[in-house]
Image (cartoon, rainbow, N blue to C red):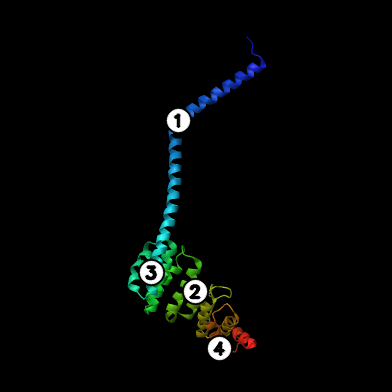
Amino acid sequence: MALTPQSNEAFLREVDEELRRDEAVAFWKRWGKLLIAAIVLGLLGLAGWLWWGSHREGRAGEQGERFNQAIEALSANQPEKSAPILADLAKSGTPGYRALSKYTQADIALQKDDLKGAAALFAEVANDSSAAQPLRDLALVRQTTAEYDTLQPQAVIDRLRPLAVKGQPWFGSAGEMTAVAHLRMGRKDLAGRLFGELARDETVPSSIRQRAVQMAGVLGVDAVDQTESKEKTAG
C-alpha cells in the first residue's frame, strides 16, 4: 500500500528520530563515563575554587588581625611581642601582609641603626612584584636612604629616576636625594634646577621644600617658597 505524502513525511521523521536515538545510545555507551567524569571534575574544580577564595579571604582577615596586634605592640613599646608575629607573616603571609610585615621589620632595623639589615628588607619589598606599587616605591626610597652614604651618586640617580619626577608620590624624598647626588657629581646646574622644582611644588612636604629653597638660593636658582609667601600675604 502506497504511503500518502503526509504518511511518508511522518515515517521519515520517525526513522530520523530513531536514527538519532540509536546514535545517541551508541555515543553514550562509548563516551558516557568520560563525560560524567569530566562533569564531576569540573564541579569539584569549581567547588575547590570557591573554597579557596573563601579560605583566602578568611586567612587574610586573620592575618590582618595579627598584623594589627603587632602594630599595637610596637605602639606600646613592646617590640618583643611584635617580632614573632612579623617574622611569621613575613614568611607565610598573603602578599599584602607579607610585604607590610617586611617593611615594618625594616623600619625597626632602621630605628636600631642597622642600616644594612634595613636596606636588605626594604629591597625585598621593593622587588616584590606581588606587593602594591606605592609600597614598593616607598620601600625603594627608604632602601636608598639607608644605603645613601655607601652608594655612588650615579647609582642614586639611576635608581630614583622614575620617582624623582614632579607628580610622583615620593617626588619630595626621591627628588632631594637625586639633587644632592647631582651636587656630589659637580652638576650644580641639574641640582639647582631640581631643588627649584622641589621648592615650588606645593605637594612636597614643607620641611623638604624649605631645604630646597635654601639650596636653590645657594646655587643661584630663584625659587620662592610659596608657603611662606602665602603666609606673608595673608598676614
Residue to which mark 3 is pinned: 70
Whichever of labels 4 and 3 marks the residue nearer the N terminus, that label is 3
Q: Are the residues at dot 3 and dot 1 in contact (C-beta closer than 8 Å)?
A: no
Place residue 194 in its image quadrant: bottom right
Residue to which mark 4 is pinned: 214
The label number, if any, that marks residue 66 in the structure image:
none
The local crowd at label 1, few if under 14, some if 14 to 19, many if 20 or more residues have their Cα within 10 Å, is few
Q: Are the residues at dot 1 and dot 4 in contact (C-beta closer than 8 Å)?
A: no
Please, what secondary structure does the residue beneath circle 3 have?
Answer: helix
Q: Is residue 142 left or right of residue 198?
A: left
Give the foreground label among 4 and 3: 3
Image point (43%, 50%), residue name = 51
Give the foreground label among 2 and 1: 1
Residue to which mark 1 is pinned: 30
Amino acid, disc 3: Ala
Please, what secondary structure does the residue beneath circle 2 have?
Answer: helix
Q: Are the residues at dot 4 and dot 3 in contact (C-beta closer than 8 Å)?
A: no
Whichever of labels 1 and 4 marks the residue nearer the N terminus, that label is 1
Give the foreground label among 1 and 4: 4
Q: Is residue 117 left or right of residue 152?
A: left
Q: Does residue 43 sit above or below 172 in this rendering?
A: above
x and y percentages locating residue 58 in the rendered image? 42, 56
The local crowd at label 3, few if under 14, some if 14 to 19, many if 20 or more residues have their Cα within 10 Å, is many
Q: CA distance from mark 1 to mark 4?
A: 85 Å
Amino acid, disc 1: Arg
Residue to which mark 2 is pinned: 159
Whichever of labels 2 and 4 marks the residue nearer the N terminus, that label is 2
Image point (54%, 82%), residue name = 206
